[in-house]
Amino acid sequence: MVSSRRHLPLIAFAFVALLGFVSRGNAAEPGVDAKAKQVWQLLDYVAVDYGGAVANGAVLKASEYAEMQEFAAAAERQMGELPRGDASANLQKQVTQLRQAIADKADPTAVAQLAHGLAGEVLKAYPFPIAPAQAPDLRRGAQLFQAQCAACHGPQGHGDGPVAATLDPKPTALSEHLRARERSLFALHQVISNGVNGTAMASFGALPEEDRWALAFFVGTLPYAAADTSAGATLWQTSAKAREAMSGLDALTQTSEHALAERLGAESARPVMAYLRANPQALAANKPGGTSIAKAKLAESVVAVQAGDRAMATKLALSAYLDGFEPVEPALATRDRPLFEKIEAGMVAYRAKVANGTVGDVQASAQALQGLLNDAEKALAPSDNDAAAAFIGALTILLREGLEALLVVVAMVAFLKKAERQDVLVYVHAGWIAALAAGGVTWAVATYMVSVSGASRELTEGFSSLFAAVVLLGVGMWMHQKSVAGRWQVYLKEKMSSALTKRAAWFLFSLAFIAVYREVFETVLFYAALWTEGNGWPLLGGLVAGMAVLGVVAAVLLRTSARLPIGKFFAASSLLVAVLAVVLAGKGIAGLQEAGWIHTSPVAFPRIDILGIRPTWQTLLAQLTVLLVVLIAFMVNTRSSEAPAPKRA
C-alpha cells in the first residue's frame, strides 16, 4: 500500500509534479474540496517526511529535499487557486513562510509544526469531510489489506511481500512505529484514495468510501502490539484526560500519535492510539460521533453551494441538523445549554445563508458552525461528572416537557369536576394514560427496532403542537365566553347535562392524548439519546424525581382550582389555555421549520423556550396571529356580555 516515493532526478520529478498538480489538460476542474484536500495532503507529506531530508541545517538526501521544495511550491500554487475568503491572505502568508523555511533548511520540528498548523487552518477555511460517518469495520479492512496490499507490504505490513523485491523504491514497512506515529488516519485515507506519485502505490479511489476508511483504520493498527491495545483499553476506561483528548471520530482521524503525545505524554499516547484505532466504536458509540456527521454534511453543503447547487446544499444542511446534531441535542442541552442554543441558531442562520446568501456568507457561516461543533465535542466528552449530568438532565427534561401537558390535562380535569361530569372525566384519564402507554411503545421501537429519524420527530412534534394549539384556542375562547356576565351559571344549570355528548367526550380524549403524547414522544427520544452505559441509575433517578415534582404540581393545581369560585375558575382557565395555544403555535412552526417544511427567516429577537418563542419571522408571526385571535375573541365576548341577556321562557 503506502510506499516511499521514488527519488527521481529533479527535472523528471518536476515534470511529474507538473502533470499531477498543475496541468488540467482535458480533465475536469476538480471541486473546491478536492483542491483543499490536495493542499492538505501536500502539507502532511512535508510535515512527516521533511525530517528525512534535512537535519541540523544540512541536506541528508538531495532527492527527498527536492521533493519537499516541490511539494511546498505546489501547495503555495494550489492555495492561490482556492476561492478567496477572509482567511486567504493569512493562509497564503503561512504557505510562503513554509516554503521559505524549507529553502532555509530550517529545523524539522519547526517545519512539521508549521505544516501541520497550516493544514489545520486549510481545513477550517475550506471544510471537507475528514471522518467516516460511522465506525469502520476493521475486519473488512483486514480482508482488503490481504487481498490488495499484502503482495507488496507483506501479510503483517513489514514491507516484505512477495513482489516487494521487484519494486524500486521498496514498499513502506507499515508496521514501523517511528514513522507511523507521525501520520494520521486521514493522511492514510488520502494516500489510499489518491495513491503516491512516482511509486508503485496506486490510487484505490475506485473502492467505496467505507472500504477506504476500513483499510485506513486497519493499516493504522499495524504499528501497534496487542499489549499496546490492552493497555489503551484500561487507560480509556479510567482516564478522563484521555477521553477528553479524543472526543470523536473526526478527532481520531485527524490526530497523529505524535500530536496526541503533546496532550497526554508519550507513555499514554501510544496505548490510547492503539486502542482507539483498533476499536473506533468506542468513539462512535459516544455522542460526539453525531457532530462528526453534522460537520461532514456541512462541508458537503458548502461544496454544493460553490458548485451552484443550492437545492442539494439545502438538503445537506437539513441533514447536518437532523441526522448529525439533533441526536446529540439532549446531552448537549444538559451539559451546556447556551452552546446548544448557539448551534441551533447557527444551523437556522446557515440554512438562510444557503437560500439567499453569497458563497462567502455561506463559507463564513459554516466555518463558525464548525467551530461551535468542535466545542460541542469537547462538552460531550465523557467526564467524571456524567452521573450528575444524567440525573439533572433527566429531571429538567421531564419537568420542561411534562409541564405543558400537565397544565392541559389539569385544566380539563378541573373543569369536568366543577361541572360534576364524572362520566366524561374517565375519557380524559383514558387519554393521558393511553399516551403514556404509547410513549412506552415508542421507546421500545426507537431502542430495539428502528431509529426514529430527526425529520419524523420534528414533523410529529410540529403537527401535534399545531393541532393542540388550534383545539386549545377554541377551548379558551369558549371558556372565556362562559366566564363573563355570569353566563357560566346559565350554562351549568341548563346546558351541561346535554352539552357533553359522546362525540365531545371522545374529543376530550383526543386532546388529552395528543397533548400528553407529543411531550412523551420528545421526552422518550431525549432519554434514549441520553442513555449510555453506566448512567442508567442516575437517569432513572432523575425520571422518578421529575415525576414526583409533577405529581406535587398537579395536586396543588387541582386543590387550588377546587377552591376558586366557578366564575374565576373559568376566567383563569381560559387565560391558561390561551397562553398554551400561543406557546404551542410557536413550537409547532419551529418543528416544521427544523424538518424543512417551512422556510426559516432569522430575526434579531430573544429566544424564550418556555414560551415557545424562536427568533424567526415565521414562528413570531404565527404566535402573533394566535395572540390577536385570542384578544379579538376576548373583546367580542366582553362586549357581547354587556348586552342584555335574552329572556328565557
Image (tube, helix red, strand yellow):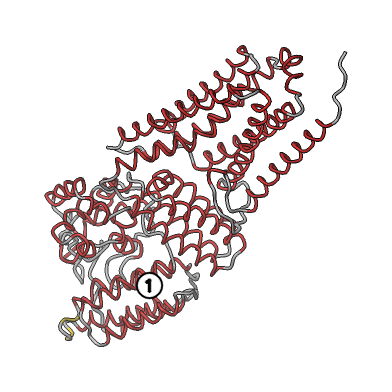
Q: Which residue occupies 11% across, 49% down?
A: 227
Compared across the picture, whether 100 is left or right of 330 comes to left
Q: Residue 57: percent from the left, percent from the top?
A: 18, 86
Compared across the picture, whether 71 is left or right of 60 comes to right
Q: Residue 579: percent from the left, percent from the top?
A: 63, 38
Residue 8 vertical placement versus 562 (above, below): below
Q: Residue 35: percent from the left, percent from the top?
A: 43, 70
Name the one closer to the observer, 305 or 494: 494
Q: In what element is the residue under mark 1?
A: helix
Label 1 amino acid? Answer: Val
Q: Which residue occupies 48% across, 52% down?
A: 341
Instruction: Report the quarter where the C terminus lies.
Output: top right
Q: Residue furthest bottom?
A: 104
Q: Which residue is mark 1?
A: 39
| Residue count near mark 1 (Cα–Cα under 10 Å), binned few <14, some 14–19, many ≥20 | many
Instruction: Report the quarter where the N terminus lies.
Output: bottom left
Name the one closer to the observer, 630 or 15: 630
Q: Residue 67: percent from the left, percent from the top?
A: 27, 79
